[in-house]
Structures are given as structure tokens and as C-alpha cells.
Amino acid sequence: MNDSGKLVPVLVVDDDDDIRKTLGCVLRSAGCQVELAPDGPACLRILREGFHGLILMDIMMPGWDGWATIHAIVDGDLLQGNLICMLTALADPGPDNEDLAGYVFDYLVKPFDGVQLLEIVRLAGESLGS
Amino acid sequence: MSLPISANSKPAGGSGLVVIGASTGGVRALCTLFENMPPLNASVLLVQHLPRFIEPSFLQTLRRHTRMTVELAQDGALLKPGTISLAPAEVHCTLDRNSRIRLRPGPPVNYVCPSIDVAMKSLSSPPEDSPLVGILLTGMGRDGADGMVHMKRLGGYTLAQDEASCAVFGMPKEAWNAGGADALLPPERIARRLLLWVGRLPGSAAAGK
């Protein structure tokens, strides 16, 4: 793995305060600019304000779950310039969300491995050309 | 000008044909696969589900992680040994006579366009001395499972990524359950198996990645 990929800004979407704080801490320590959203509507608000980068998306959230939030991102034409990685306790996304296969860049299961997480952040940066 | 191919012709140079499909988690898996692989004596067609806007930078990413040439597949072009041709976003990619690229718009298949199934199912039987290999990496859903079954029926070798190394085991699991994969392996071992089956590109240096 070369080091040419830069660290992109990361938007963490998770209803769990502890997860948001932990991810914020890990990612800022690695040099990322981090935005935090406790739910889908907050995620969309941040995207409309111009965020571009990697979105770390929880699946099981009250209100809109992660899949519904991705649908809203796509329907709202807010995907451009962003890649989405699921970060979830669900080891298997199941068969019900195949229609989103083309929109999900990567998938990481909690408890997450920090090395793997930063590899995804680095590859997302390379793939976004940032 | 007549085409330098016959009904069952292999790509020029007596080389093999490798079709790789990948979706969610595929960029990570592909980087590991390509970093462990010398230039192959094969033409490689890669179908990776990705949004169109990252296509140019994704090509650059691939080039940083492989010693093979990487190109965006062009309609009407012939696959080339030692070259990875990336199927572009939002069109289906098929191969005429296992060698000439065809790009056509069409409705999503398995919810995606390009579809791995569409690409793999366009293949025909290769000549005996031209290895045909299908590889299905990590991804949600079941795109590629039927294509792998088709490639196996043609006499091809088929490998799917194993569960432990997958971001999402969905597509490889479907291929395995359908009988479309000879083995489940991590990308590093898929790279070694590929080298065994198709060999190194003549003239490429033995040392390196």
C-alpha cells in the first residue's frame, strides 16, 4: 500500500453518543476533519451545507435507519463527491437492500478495527481523488 | 478491415481471459489482489460497482496498486494481454468472442449497471489452450453468481472471495451456493492461483510486487 491517498473529511452518522465521540477522537488523531451527525436528517443537513468526503453510516438508528438515509441522500442528489461506508453491528446486511449495492463503497462491522478503518479512509481519499 | 479473431478465438498473444467482479468493499480487496499479482499473461476485464463520479480517480487508484496496465474499457476495442480494462459506470459491458468490448446502455440487472452477470454471461467457450478465469469478490446482493456458474460451465476456473476477508460475503456466498465457485479464498491466495493458471506476462520482470 502506498501513502499517496490523502485523508478525506469524514462524516460520522450514528445515534450512539459514545460511538460518535470515539470515532471522532480516532479520526481527528489520524488527521481527519470530522463532522458528527446523530441521525439521518442531521446527515442530510451537513451534506446540503457542502460536506464532501467519506460518510460512515450506522444502520440501526431510530427514525431513519442507515438504508433510509442512503435513499434520501441518493434521492436528494447529495451523493456526488461522497463515498459511503456502513459501520454497523450487523455482520450481514441481509438481502433486503440489494438495490443500494452500487452506492455502498465499503462495510465495516463493530467493534471496528482502527487499522482497517483508517485503510478505508485512505482508500476513499484515493478513490475520490482528493 | 476484418477482425483478427475467429469464433472461439482467445485474446491476442495466446493468453488467458480473467473476468473480475466486485462491489461493496471491492476497492480494498482489489488493491490486495493486485498488489500480490505480477503482470499476468491474460486480459483482465474488471466490473466494479461504483458511482460514475469516482471513475477517473478510481482508475488512478488501480494504477497505483498494480503493475499491469489499467484502462477504461472502450466500446469496440479489443482486450489486451497484460491490461486490466475497467467497465465504465452506467452501461453494461459484454465481450464479443471473448475479446471485443461492447458497451450498451440498459436497465439495471440485479439493481446494478454495469452488471457482473451480464459481462460474465456474454462469454463463450475458450480454446483449450486459453485459460478462462472468473473471480467474484466482496459485495452485497447476488450479482455475479449466475455469471460464475456460466463461466464454470464453459470450463473456466472460478474463485470467490472467502467470508473472513470479505467486507460483505453476499455475492461470493451466492456464487458458492449456486455451485459457481471452485474455491473460496482471500485475495492474496486468489492472486497466487491466478499466476498458476495464466502465468506471467512474457517480458515482464520477475521481481517486484
Image (spheres, rainbow, N blue to C red):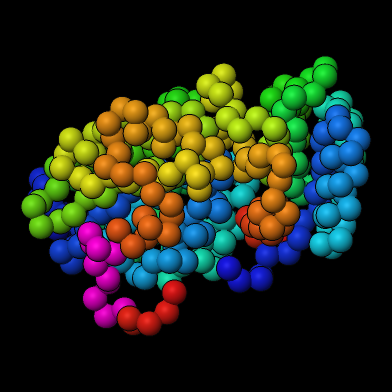
Q: Nearer the viewer, residue B102 or A106?
A: A106
Q: Position of residue B165 (x, y in %)?
A: 50, 48
> Looking at the figure, which quarter contains the C terminus of chain B?
bottom left
Q: Main secondary structure of the magenta part?
A: loop
Q: Is residue B67 above or below residue B206?
A: above
Left or right: residue B68 compared with residue A108 = left
B198 magenta-colored: yes
Quarter of the view holding residue A60: top right
Q: Position of residue B8 (x, y in %)?
A: 11, 47
Left or right: residue A62 compared with residue B69 = right
Query: Which residue is pictured at 63% across the width and 46% down the height?
Result: B53
Left or right: residue B48 compared with residue B6 = right
Q: How many marks?
A: 0
Q: Nearer the viewer, residue A2 or B13?
A: A2
Start and end of the magenta stretch? Answer: B195-204
B8 magenta-colored: no
Query: Is residue A27 visible in the rendered structure shown here?
Result: yes
Q: Is residue B34 above or below residue B206?
A: above
> Looking at the figure, which quarter contains the N terminus of chain B?
bottom left
Q: Nearer the viewer, residue A63 or B182?
A: B182
Query: Which residue is pictured at 31% across the width and 27% down the height?
Result: B178
Q: Position of residue B155 (x, y in %)?
A: 15, 42
Q: Position of residue B154 (x, y in %)?
A: 16, 39
Query: Is residue B90 visible in the rendered structure shown here?
Result: no
Quarter of the view holding residue A98: top right
Query: Which residue is pictured at 36% across the width and 55% down the height?
Result: B190
Query: Which residue is pictured at 70% across the width and 32% down the height?
Result: A89
Q: Nearer the viewer, residue B99 or B49?
A: B49
Quarter of the view holding residue A126: bottom right
